[in-house]
Image (tube, helix red, strand yellow):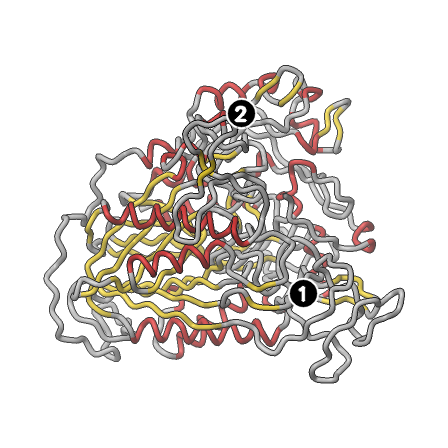
Amino acid sequence: MRRLFFIGPLLLALALLGCSSDPVESTTSDLDMVLRDTAEVAQGVDGEPDALALDGVDAAEPDASGRALPFTIGDGDWVGVAVVDATPEGFETFTDLNGNHVFDGCRTEPAGGTPDCPEPYDDLNANKDFDGVFIAGFSELRAAMTVHDPIEVRAIVFARGPEYIAIVSVDVIGLAGDRIERAQTRLAEMGWDPERVIVTSTHTHQGPDTRGLWGSPFDTSGVWSGARPEYNALLTDRIVEAVELAGKAVQPVTLKAGAARMRDRSEWFNGEPFGGKSPSRRMQGLLNDIRDPVIVSDQLLAVQALGMDGETVATLVSFSGHPELVGDQSNALSADYVYFLRQLVETRLGGRSVFVPEALGGMQSTLGGSIPMVNEDGTWAMTTPEGGGEPVPTMSAAEGFDHARAAGTHLADAAVDVLASGDTFTLEPFVVSSTLMHFPTDNGSFQLLFSLGLFDVDPNLAVKDPDVCPWFTNGGPLHPGCVPATIWRVRLGAVEFLTAPGELTPELFWGLPTDPRFVEESNDPSKRGSGEGRESVYFPAHPPACDSTPYAECENDLEAGACDCTDFHVWPYVARFTDAVAPVTRLAAKYRFVISNADDHLGYIVPEPDFNRRVSALTGETGDHYEDTNSLTFRFSTLLDEGWQRLLTP
């Protein structure tokens, strides 16, 4: 299901910009190669923990590099974790008269009862302004009525000698970079290095709107952002608090890591084209990718820190699926499946769990797919087929909390299993590197939303210096400038990752599949499509009328003859213009992953060679290129890859 938001009729006057360059074929790698390379041994993985000396190092004493540690540690590996509640309180609710889960009243009419403003709300502070919490995801004005589970900020700190990194995960759809920067600045005043504090978001579609898109751009009383600045300011406070508490909680640990592809966990996690039994044809590894090509990043990775008493201190878990499985028929705040995943990991292993999102784009989600359901005790629900026979899993039929709980359970099972057979490692080598990037705001819709003030972003932070933002001078009257965002490469012994300030499509990090079927469908559009005797595995949305159409013909219009360009993808399919190899292959550690939405949430990051710059959220003509309409710039992937290559070059 597409996550659409209606921007309003005024946007129809806004023209989208530009055209893309001719793509060239790139050299890429297969996800299988990385995850199946069990023979690789990472530097620093010796199977034995280092001896741990408990004599502390004064936190105020600079190390050899001149940087003071913001906390006290001894020799060896140290980890601290903290969980801080950030659940909105005292918010106003409405009466959902028509049961559509959307506030159909007016912000200044508490009593409702009129044709234009039928639904009333509880004006708790008697200010005649609806002070509700809008839920980020799906439709506008889906206001919260209750809380299913807490909205939290979770932080984990890894440290060894003078080196450390803090990773923070917030239960919201995404945070603007300036909110994160304010937290980093305050932490710097407390002794933390801001370039060693990475903030991401779980991307839950049941959390408060922190970006402003899920209010109403054109309410009868004017532009109405869904973001509450006072709540976003609270999140900045909670990030600072969580990092400080995690730093104070660091203790000596031994570490374990493990990873698995969810597609290998059960045939019921995959559709028939991928050798499985799920009735969802596009399903692979619990992910129902709804954008062509069907490429998923279904790695479940877990890192466990064990204290000197052998008890779990913390577990870091990474996975790609959108936390949107509760769906749009709920008005309860929640972390979605991430809540169930963390809760189960903590119940089974102890300690606290921190979740970070992997490649989210393209579209990495279980929504719309059918997965095995689970009982209250976590066992699989089974059904005996009509006519008898061996029981088979009861498959999910609809979105909701049961669907989210099932996905969270399957992922928690995988996390526990991979750690049971995982590698013991140390944090040596410990390497943190970062670079500041500047991304232009080429998306016409985003430009207008910025100018209207719907985004919770300080417009003064936009960079207009032509030396770092050359696109600003010819970007049109509404171009606010470039958005600064930091990207990281972090090596923690056997574990290594890159970051991206948006929702990354998997192929940009992992490379393209080497499956002969993908190679054939990539190179030959006549092998794509579904129906009419076609059964494409990777490009089922392809229109047969586009078989002989050069992709370049779709750069100037939504149609090229009989070809519907909104459902057409570049051929041969490539992820980048250059011949650079997939970034994952240049990372040195055994366990590798990427963190999306780190340091900012700038929309989808789609391969530029496949970016359709003519589709528009203004008209709703998005086809199979919905993600392109919700991306900061068509240049996003190319600029990000350039930054990654700098970090990956010695």
Q: In this view, does 104 lie above or below 410?
A: below
Residue at the image position 25 percent from the left and 56 percent from the top: 430
Which structural element holds mark 1? Answer: loop
Most foreground residue, 123 or 218: 123
Mark 2–mark 1 Cα distance, whole angstroms, equals: 39 Å
Q: Where is residue 64 in the image (x, y as percent from the top left)?
A: 21, 69
Mark yes or no: residue 646 visible. Answer: no
Which quarter of the image is occupied by the N terminus?
top right
Which structural element holds mark 2? Answer: loop
* Residue position for label 2: 537
Most foreground residue, 564 or 642: 564
Given the current orientation, which residue lies at the most extreme front position? 387
Q: Quadrant of residue 95?
A: bottom right
Residue at the image position 29 percent from the left and 73 percent from the top: 249
Q: Nearer the viewer, mark 2 or mark 1?
A: 1
Residue at the image position 33 percent from the left and 63 percent from the top: 165
Q: How many marks?
A: 2
Q: Position of residue 634 (x, y in %)?
A: 61, 44
Amino acid type, mark 1: Ala
Q: In which quarter of the image is residue 223?
A: bottom right
- Labels 2 and 1: the sequence-earlier one: 1
Q: Is residue 582 above or below residue 130?
A: above
Amino acid type, mark 2: Val
* Residue position for label 1: 143
